[in-house]
Every structure is written in structure tokens, then in C-alpha cells.
Image: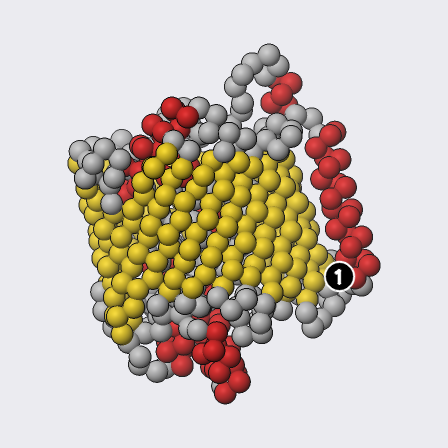
């Protein structure tokens, strides 16, 4: 597709979205005329407008400073309790929910003609109590990719079972889960060094916004137990090896089990409230053949509209390049993310984050590896992407989410991830919410030096129109 054709498609997409805002029926507005409430909008799609991830920043409500302060304090105190003891779903709630999504994507490449494709997705979540103390949980997604131009990739389908586990409430404060479980950890937004089970869990076709990557990923098969008490909690997860050996984040793993259960792994998470607004979360993670890693998550509320957070992990481990080249360079290395989210009175949330990874490489090390051993360099880049790790020693992340931009239920989201040395990825979405469906326009661009993960991507930019229908 020519550059002129790409620009035309972008213009048509923008015009279509603007038109949809003006003529599509806003059922919630019509039904709630004269009322102050707003219908809740489902948020299960991996490609939806990225709400702030499950961190204390979710609780800040700039429209009411007093309410925001209380909500943010509660979120800070409950950071460690993201996985409560299992309980039966509300009898009034449906045991299932699903959505169907269709996305048309135009991609521009550095060294190839642009292409056009269609992605049809069906997403299902199910939770049902068998008896009052036992419930089953299931989450899966099916994607169908179809070419719409001769330069697009051929037809293919992909099925992902994210979760499939049973939950037993032993007591009101103690729960046990068994099966394929999604363990999501971390106080930061753009980079989560303590999210140990993210490695190998995300498919490449998932939207790059952080919330989508935390939500739409493979769980690990294991057993998890948690106990809660007044002011704290303790949790233990064991994930056994169920396939031939494969290190987490191995880009060449041939099955879902090898991606998530190629080694024995365990995780301990504990928290205890130390003051009215501070409850740190301590972690210890172990992996077959590796030294234990320790971690810390912390959030504070310095002002009613600001949530600050810090995430840190440390332990003996190999560097990213060492893992990929087979060189044993294990040493004590740390990784961290420090940032804050500010919510303005305009319902605009801005997050800024500084990132570091002691297992990453400097720009000069990446350039040297690319020139001296291109094959090893390619494997290191792929390993970093599959592991969702920061490939450089330092990085920065900025994100903005603006709700109700001029029109009720119209949201604008954007982020930029910058790696040390010039690699960068930018993403923007304009999304209109309705009672049972959303429409969105998504723009994405990445670039940088050829040794960087973003500069090495074949796709340099994309434009995507998305329609999502909920049930």
C-alpha cells in the first residue's frame, strides 16, 4: 500500500470515529435524562482504553478531593490484597460474560509494503459456585486473523486459556486456588520488576498498553493459598514443572505449558500495615536453577490527588544478554520503578515513571553484540520481548488518561515508553463508550536505533479501528 493510501486510510478512520460520536445512539444518555448517574461500562477487552492498572492510582477521584483521599488511602492499604480469599459470586450476577471484538489494522513497515488485516476476537469469562465454599473460574480468548491485502500475513487462529482454576474458601479469611492461575503483582504502571510470572505469558498480538498486557495473558498452572488478617495478608504460590525444561521468557517455547510451567517456581507474598496510610508488600520468588529474588512494593498518598509508588527487586541472576548467549555472568542485580500519578480536576490522570534494570545492557553493549554476533543479538532481543523485561539499564514512561473529553463517555489515552539510547514506543487511543459496545481508534508508532527492541520491530506504525460488543 502506498504512503498516499496509508494517509487516506488514516483520514477515513478518523472521520469514521468522529461520525460515530455524533450519530450513534447514546442509550445511557437517553435512558438517564435528568439523572446524575452513569451506566457502568464493561472493561474486559484486552484492547480497551487502558484504565490505570490495579494500583492505588485507580482510586483517585479528582472531582471530590475528600472522597479521593479516602479511596486512595484504602487502595494503598490494600495493595497486597489484590487476590482475596475465594468467595462465591453474587447470586444476582451472571456467572458468565463475554465480548466480541473486530479490529481492522493497517500496518506500515520499514522494509516492506504496508498491509491490511482483520482480527476477530471472542473473549469469555465464567465464574460459578458449585457449593457455597467452592467455585470454578474460567477465562479464555479466541483470535482469528485474516489478510485484507496481498502483503498481509496469511490466515491464522489462536486460542488462549488464561485461567482455569477452582477456588475453595476454607474459612472466611483463608482460601486455596488450584489450576491455571494468573498471578499479577506490582505497584508500578509501565514496568513491573516484581511481576515475576509475566515472563512468557503475553502474546505478541496483545495491545501494548500496560493494562491489556496485565489482563490478557496466560496464567501459570499451580496451587495458591492465602490467609488474611486485620491489617495484613500472606500468600504462597507453587507452580510445578509440567513440560520439558524451558526457562520463563524463552521465546522459542513450543507450547503454553512450556511457556508457563517449564521449571519449578514458587512465590511468597506478605504484607502488614505499619501506619494509617502505609502497607508495604514484601515478596520472595524462587525458580529452579536460580537464586531466590526478593522484592518490595510500596505506595503512599502525599496529597489527595497524588499517589506515589515504588517497586524494587534484587538477587543474583544472569544479565539479559548472558541468558541469551549462554554466558554465566550471574551477579547481584537490582531492578526498580519509581513514579507517581496525579489526577487533575479535569478528570485527567498523568503518570510519570523512572525505570532501571541491572540485568539490562548499555547501548554500547547492544551495538557491540549486534555487530559481532547478529544471531545472539536477535535471540537477546526476542528474549527481552518475551520476558517483558526492560532491555536497557534505564528507561522512562509517561501516560495520560483523560475521561469525558468534551463529550460524555469519550476517553483519550496515550503513553510513551522510552529506552536508554533512543528506542521508543508511542500509543494513542480515542474511545467512545456506549451501554453495550465501544468504538475506538488506535494509533501506534515505534522506532529508534536498529539494536533496540523498538528499532528492530518490522512494523514502524499502525492505525487500527476497533468495535467491541459486550454481553
Q: Is residue 446 above or below residue 85?
A: below
Asked whether, in this view, residue 261 is left or right of residue 224, the answer is right
In front: 440, or 346? 346
- Residue 333 visible: yes
Q: Is residue 251 above or below residue 143?
A: below
Q: Is residue 453 above or below residue 207?
A: below
Q: Position of residue 192 (x, y in %)?
A: 38, 55
Q: Is residue 208 above or below residue 85?
A: below
Mark 1: which secondary structure?
A: loop
- Residue 197 visible: no
Q: Residue furthest top?
A: 34
Q: Residue furthest right?
A: 4
Asked whether, in this view, residue 318 is left or right of residue 343, the answer is left
Report the quarter where the N terminus lies: bottom right
Q: Quadrant of residue 261?
A: bottom left
For the rendered model, the colour scheme is secondary structure
Q: Position of residue 98 (x, y in %)?
A: 52, 39
The residue drawn where x is 70% and y is 56% is 106
Report the quarter where the C terminus lies: top right
In front: 400, or 428? 400
Label 1 neighbour load within 10 Å: few <14, some 14-19, many 20+: some
Q: Position of residue 143 (x, y in %)?
A: 57, 53
The residue drawn where x is 66% and y is 45% is 441
Q: Quadrant of residue 108?
A: bottom right
Q: Quadrant of residue 445?
A: bottom right
In front: 179, or 424? 424
Residue placed under numbered mark 1 in the picture: 149
Q: Position of residue 265 (x, y in %)?
A: 27, 62
The residue drawn where x is 54% and y is 74% is 451
The residue drawn where x is 59% and y is 52% is 427
Amino acid at each position: 500500500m502506498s504512503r498516499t493510501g496509508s494517509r487516506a486510510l488514516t483520514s477515513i478512520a478518523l472521520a469514521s470515529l468522529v461520525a460515530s460520536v455524533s450519530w450513534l445512539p447514546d442509550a445511557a444518555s437517553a435512558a438517564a435524562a435528568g439523572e446524575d448517574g452513569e451506566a457502568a461500562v464493561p472493561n474486559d477487552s484486552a484492547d480497551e482504553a487502558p484504565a490505570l492498572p490495579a494500583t492505588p492510582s485507580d482510586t483517585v477521584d479528582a472531582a471530590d478531593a475528600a472522597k479521593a483521599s479516602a479511596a486512595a488511602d484504602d487502595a494503598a492499604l490494600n495493595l497486597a490484597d489484590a487476590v482475596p480469599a475465594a468467595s462465591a459470586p453474587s447470586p444476582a450476577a451472571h456467572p458468565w460474560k463475554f465480548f466480541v471484538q473486530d479490529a481492522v489494522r493497517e500496518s506500515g513497515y520499514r522494509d516492506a509494503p504496508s498491509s491490511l488485516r482483520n482480527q476477530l476476537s471472542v473473549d469469555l469469562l465464567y465464574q460459578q459456585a458449585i457449593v457455597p465454599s467452592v467455585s470454578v473460574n474460567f477465562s479464555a480468548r479466541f483470535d482469528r486473523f485474516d489478510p485484507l491485502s496481498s502483503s498481509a500475513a496469511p490466515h491464522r487462529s489462536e486460542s488462549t486459556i488464561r485461567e482455569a482454576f477452582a477456588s475453595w474458601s476454607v474459612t472466611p479469611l483463608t482460601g486455596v486456588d488450584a489450576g491455571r492461575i494468573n498471578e499479577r503483582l506490582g505497584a508500578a504502571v509501565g514496568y513491573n520488576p516484581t511481576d515475576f510470572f509475566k515472563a512468557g505469558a503475553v502474546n505478541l498480538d496483545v495491545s501494548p498498553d500496560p493494562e491489556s498486557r496485565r489482563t490478557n495473558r496466560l496464567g501459570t498452572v499451580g496451587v495458591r493459598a492465602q490467609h488474611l488478617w486485620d491489617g495484613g495478608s500472606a500468600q504462597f504460590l507453587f507452580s510445578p514443572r509440567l513440560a520439558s525444561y524451558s526457562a520463563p521468557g524463552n521465546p522459542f517455547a513450543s507450547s503454553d505449558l512450556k511457556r508457563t510451567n517449564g521449571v519449578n517456581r514458587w512465590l511468597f507474598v506478605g504484607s502488614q500495615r505499619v501506619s494509617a496510610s502505609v502497607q508495604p508488600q514484601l515478596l520472595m520468588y524462587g525458580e529452579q536453577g536460580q537464586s531466590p529474588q526478593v522484592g518490595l512494593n510500596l505506595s503512599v498518598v502525599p496529597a489527595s490527588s497524588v499517589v506515589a509508588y515504588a517497586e524494587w527487586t534484587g538477587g543474583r541472576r544472569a544479565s539479559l544478554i548472558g541468558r541469551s548467549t549462554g554466558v554465566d555472568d550471574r551477579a547481584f542485580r537490582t531492578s526498580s520503578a519509581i513514579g507517581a500519578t496525579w489526577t487533575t480536576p479535569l478528570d485527567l490522570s498523568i503518570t510519570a515513571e523512572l525505570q532501571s534494570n541491572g540485568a539490562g545492557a548499555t547501548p554500547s553493549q547492544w551495538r557491540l553484540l549486534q555487530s559481532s554476533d547478529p544471531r545472539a543479538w536477535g535471540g537477546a532481543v526476542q528474549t527481552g520481548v518475551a520476558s517483558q523485561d526492560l532491555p536497557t539499564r534505564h528507561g522512562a514512561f509517561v501516560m495520560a488518561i483523560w475521561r469525558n473529553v468534551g463529550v460524555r463517555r469519550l476517553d483519550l489515552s496515550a503513553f510513551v515508553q522510552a529506552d536508554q539510547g533512543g528506542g521508543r514506543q508511542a500509543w494513542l487511543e480515542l474511545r467512545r463508550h456506549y451501554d453495550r459496545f465501544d468504538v475506538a481508534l488506535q494509533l501506534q508508532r515505534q522506532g529508534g536505533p536498529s539494536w533496540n527492541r523498538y528499532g528492530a520491530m518490522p512494523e514502524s506504525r499502525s492505525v487500527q479501528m476497533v468495535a467491541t460488543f459486550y454481553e
